[in-house]
Image (spheres, grey):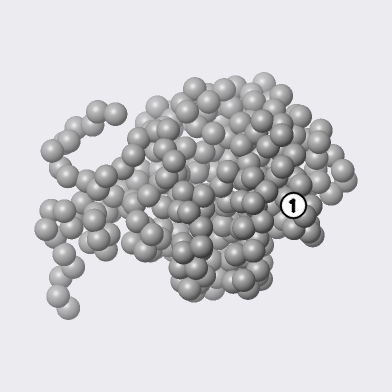
Amino acid sequence: MRTEFADFPLPARSSKPRTAGLSMMIDWGMGLERQKDTLASAGDYVDIAKIAAGIARLMPASLLREKLRHYEAHGIHTAPSGLFAELALKPGRYERFLEQAVEAGFSGIEVSDNLLDLSPPDKAAAIRRARAMGLSVYGEAGRKEGTMDDAALLRDVANCLDAGADRVFLEAAELFSANQVRSSLIAALAREFPRERLIYELPVVILPGVTRDYKHKITAWLVRELGTDVNLANIEWDELYLTELVRLGFAGDTSHPQGAYRLAGMHAREA
């Protein structure tokens, strides 16, 4: 992609199709024209789009299919929410749910157990079945209450990957709770698993106590600790450029060790 001001140095960033440094945009049912405008402007910075919650059940079928075709045309993988899959698993509708996801045009599926009490073998079986249908599979580790200890969450990630999940979303509530970052858990995840297989969910602002500035702070922390090519999820359509600026250390602070400001010789001022 050609941009203006190309002589300003930036940290290395791979282009699409990427294997690391992925950005997942969360789609809360945006209309087709907004989707087209967003992808025309910032589609190069979107690798995965998730149709949030159960919105795929409410949206007109023709619109959903057109949206999914438009994402595909921009090289963007798609998946419905893991909570939707849980709703299908509970009454034994999962097989038909997978068939319908393929028919609609989704390229992937998310398998989570946020609300559903799903045993590790059953979760692994759900992942394997989706793979057999030709879908990319995103496991999710963690619960929205943030109740898993470090060892249990690490086992959950391993179970997903061993079952064949392409990547694993890490539930934000497990990593960032009550304004505290579970830095030792994040360090353990980075040691135990390949960087490209983990996608760190950012907290979403619809949740109580989560603000845009807190989300921005968490994004900057993850990039500073894990690098430009950390995989990030739950980016809103109007946060795509800001998130990319944070990745590149070009967002108003000098905390990124290899960021644009550091490359230009700018450092934090002495106190």
x and y percentages locating residue 251 in the rendered image: 28, 53
Counting from the top left corner in percent of width and height, residue 20 is at: 42, 45
| Residue at 58% across, 40% down | 50
Between 9 and 32, the one lying in front of the other is 9
Q: Is residue 173 above or below residue 22?
A: below
Residue 192 position in % (x across, y down) = 51, 62
- For label 1, the SS is helix
Identified by mark 1, the residue type is: Lys
Q: Nearer the viewer, residue 177 or 262?
A: 262
Task: Name which residue lies at 77% across and 55% down.
Answer: 121
Instruction: Give the quadrant of residue 212.
Output: bottom left
Name the image quarter holding the N terminus.
top left
Residue drawn where x is 37% and y is 63% of the image: 225
The quarter holding residue 224 reads bottom left
Q: Is residue 268 left or right of residue 246?
A: left
Comparing 236 with 33, the one in front is 236
- Residue position for label 1: 123
* Position in image of residue 245 (x %, y %): 31, 48
